[in-house]
């Protein structure tokens, strides 16, 4: 499932991140991928150990914590600390699939089920830089407003088009979901959205309660914690 979540960050948070990233010291992004990825990845990242990465990551995680749409869609069990990247001067990241298992700072491992990119500057600030995601329906081109997030299955082939003017700034991170399977996660998301709409429509309360029970019992049946 591909989902656009608007206004994850408010304009104040976007400005705070942008101001910090404008002064940041960047490193070569190919350092955090394997040999295959390094052949196609040409961008910059905040170093993993940088205090700034941690500080800005906390702002992103706090914004996610208050976003019900994100929780309903991702059903997060574990989230890797956000990273920040910058594409400029024809910077690009060719077709790749994200690594399946990643290490947390303490050594624990996280399976990547859901990938997220949070756009940090406006689309008219740079040319190119579209995130292209391939799924069974074809290719989807994504270039969002500053503060907006795209959520997509980590299993999908994707790339970032070369940036020919300006710079593209984004945060990105991976989630191990309570629900490993993308199709099951999508069903739960659609049922949850439907229940929320019924709650606001004055529908029969007993029927809504019953449907809510079905949602939680499916979650109980499928969830891995
Ligand atoms: Ni990727």
Image (cartoon, helix red, strand yellow):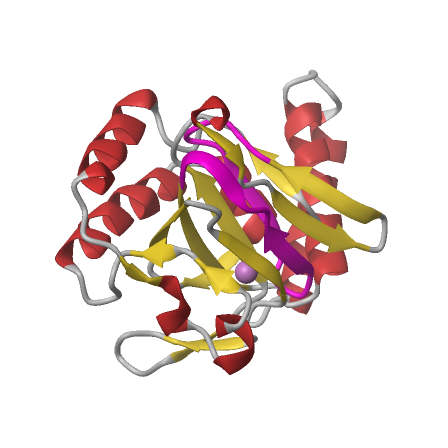
- Is residue 35 at all visible to an observer of this figure? yes
Vertical placement of residue 36 versus 23, above or below = below
Q: Left of 187 or right of it: where is 53? A: left
Q: Left of 48 or right of it: where is 9? A: right
Q: Tell me where residue 44 sits by quadrant.
A: bottom left
Is 7 in front, or is 132?
Answer: 132
Instruction: Name the residue rendered at 27%, 75% in the picture.
Output: 105
Instruction: Name the residue rendered at 53%, 41% in the picture.
Output: 129
Is 113 in front, or is 68?
Answer: 113
Q: Tell me where residue 28 sits by quadrant.
A: bottom left
Measured as percent of width and height from the top left, residue 192 is found at: 66, 40
Q: Tell me where residue 180 sits by quadrant.
A: bottom right
Measured as percent of width and height from the top left, residue 84 is found at: 34, 51
- Is residue 82 at all visible to an observer of this figure? no
Measured as percent of width and height from the top left, residue 83 is found at: 34, 56
- The single residue placed furthest to the top in the displayed view is 202
Q: Left of 9 or right of it: where is 115? A: right
Number of marks drawn: 0
Instruction: Name the residue rendered at 69%, 16% in the picture.
Output: 202
The reply to whether the magenta stretch includes residue 14 is no
Instruction: Name the residue rendered at 76%, 33% in the picture.
Output: 207
Is 63 in front, or is 92?
Answer: 92
Q: Left of 20 or right of it: where is 219? A: right
Measured as percent of width and height from the top left, residue 26 is found at: 25, 55
Q: Locate ligand 1 by image quadrant.
A: bottom right
Is 218 in front, or is 106?
Answer: 106
Provide the residue span drawn in magenta. 143-168
The reply to whether the magenta stretch includes residue 149 is yes
């Amino acid at each position: 499932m591909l989902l656009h979540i608007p206004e994850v960050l408010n304009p104040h948070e976007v400005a705070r991140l942008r101001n910090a990233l404008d002064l940041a010291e960047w490193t070569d992004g190919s350092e955090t991928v394997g040999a295959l990825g390094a052949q196609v990845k040409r961008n910059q990242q905040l170093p993993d150990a940088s205090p700034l990465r941690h500080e800005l990551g906390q702002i992103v995680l706090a914004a996610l914590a208050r976003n019900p749409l994100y929780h309903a869609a991702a059903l997060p069990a574990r989230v890797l600390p956000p990273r920040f990247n910058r594409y400029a001067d024809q910077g690009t990241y060719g077709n790749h699939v994200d690594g399946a298992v990643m290490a947390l700072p303490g050594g624990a491992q996280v399976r990547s089920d859901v990938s997220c990119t949070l756009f940090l500057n406006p689309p008219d600030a740079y040319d190119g830089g579209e995130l292209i995601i391939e799924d069974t329906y074809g290719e989807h081109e994504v270039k969002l407003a500053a503060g907006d997030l795209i959520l997509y299955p980590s299993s999908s082939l994707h790339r970032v088009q070369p940036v020919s003017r300006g710079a593209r700034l984004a945060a990105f991170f991976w989630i191990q979901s309570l629900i490993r399977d993308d199709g099951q996660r999508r069903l739960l998301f659609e049922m949850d959205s439907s229940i929320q709409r019924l709650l606001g429509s004055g529908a029969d309360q007993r029927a809504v309660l019953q449907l809510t029970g079905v949602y939680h019992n499916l979650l109980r049946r499928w969830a891995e914690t």
